[in-house]
Amino acid sequence: MKITRHSRFLLRLQGLVFTVLFTGIIGMLAWLSTEYVYQADWTASGRNTVSEDTRKLLDSMKAPISITAFVRENKLLRTQIQDVIGSYQRFKDNITLEFVNPDTAPERVRELGITPNGELLVSYRGRSENVRSLGERQLTNALLRISRQDDRWIVFVTGHGERSPSGVANHDLGDFGRELERKGLNVQTVNLAETDIPRNTHTLVLASPRVKLLPGEIRRLQEYVKNGGNLLWLAEPGELQGLEPLAEQLGIEFLPGMVVDATAQMFGVENPAFVVVTAYPRHDVTNDMETVTMFPEAVALDINDTQDWDSLPLLLTLERSWTELGKLEGDISFDPDTDERAGPLIIGIVLTRTVASGEERDPTEQRVIVTGDGDFLSNTYLGNAGNLGLGLSMTHWLSHDETLIDIHIKSAPDTSLVLGNISRAVISLGFLFGLPALLLITGLVIWIRRRRR
């Protein structure tokens, strides 16, 4: 081919057009990579992809989700959290993740009740919940709870010196009431001397009355329980303030004296009236409880034989405890010659039974929890150990708000390689003799070819 000035111009123009087009295509691909993301999970069980139930829940949550991770400058833990949240962000692009060092924001940590390093605060439409265990089951169920649309009313009985859900005094439950509202629950009070218990009550809370209730108020409480209402009774040592008929109706008995726990000193508590609970039974209320709980000045409970209720001891003291009948002064010890009872003692009971909800509705499960202490949810002690988590779990369960998505743990069959004896022998001999021989033969072939040139 004869090269002329015109053909040379065409060749240069062709090269310029190719360069421009190639650069444009590379730039377009780079832009597309920022606008569109494609990821594939090639693991055998799809363990890096959230479950179908989680994806359906994310599709139903149209508003943005905000997740704040309270993590110290730990690159490994932060990467793990990013990976878990990233599996959610693949199916919902308006999930935001923020990292906060709890050491630099102590007031915020204290206000939100953040305890362990790595705890997540999940927020959606003004509702929020803390997640302490990093996993799909825990995170998805937290999203499920804060995304619900129905209103659940937690009603506190008032008018007898009870602990107020909005009070600021040390013995009040103001901090706990605000936590309930932050979880999307509606908190209300009712004076039984003025009005009946509202019909939309999901859980009635009887928080340590200090004045005797009137007979008419007792009848209203008994009628509420008889009709299938859920109840949280936070009792205290001493008089029952006229609530003996309610205790008889529930089939429980309050033992005399105050529970003394000698093992509390192991946790740095010098006051013998503090009871420490370290283990919990298998129950929906305590399945996620991993920390101890503390109960100041508790009364022990006993369960009477009754066919009306199915009962389960929810909170048990340790063996080195007893019901002290005397004053907590000086050296105190268990006296077997008196009516004092040795531990383990029950300080929390769960009662359930099936009740009819009407002719056209299926029977429902009535739920009651009675604890021998109300101080553990007070403003003074709510932040101790796992007290807040236990109180929230009790409330969720009582209001039938424990509906969970069962996330099955995905096995990982492709994380290990099992070799037989023959396979191991072949690999060992191959690396020990085969590979060096192959390199030697290759070198000899190259050397012989060069010699022949």
Image (cartoon, helix red, strand yellow):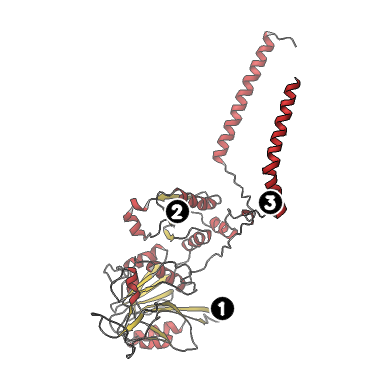
Label 2 amino acid? Ile
Type of the residue with mark 3: Arg
Q: Is residue 24 above or below residue 134?
A: above
Name which residue type carries label 1: Asp
Q: Earlier in the sequence, mark 3 or mark 1?
A: 1
Dot 3: few (<14), some (14–19), or many (≥20) neighbours within 10 Å? few
- What residue is drawn where x is 40% and y is 88%? 248
Measured from the top left, where is residue 333 in percent x and y? 30, 82
Q: Which residue is mark 1?
A: 362
Query: Residue 374, labelled with which disc?
Result: none
Quarter the C terminus occupies:
top right
Position of residue 162 measured from the top left corner of the image (x, y, whole percent): 30, 76
Spot occupied by residue 447 in the image (x, y as percentages of width and height): 71, 26
Task: Residue at 45% x, 85% y: name it.
Answer: 226
Residue 314 or residue 9, whichever sits in front = 314
Q: Secondary structure at mark 1?
A: loop
Image disc number at residue 67 = 2
> Can you give x and y, in whole percent of width and height, for residue 311 in the image?
47, 82
Instruction: Identify whether 250 is placed above or below 419.
Output: below
Considering depth in this image, is 219 or 391 the residue closer to the camera? 391
Q: Is residue 96 visible?
A: no
Q: Which residue is mark 3?
A: 424
Q: Is residue 410 above or below residue 351?
A: above
Q: Is residue 411 left or right of residue 212?
A: right
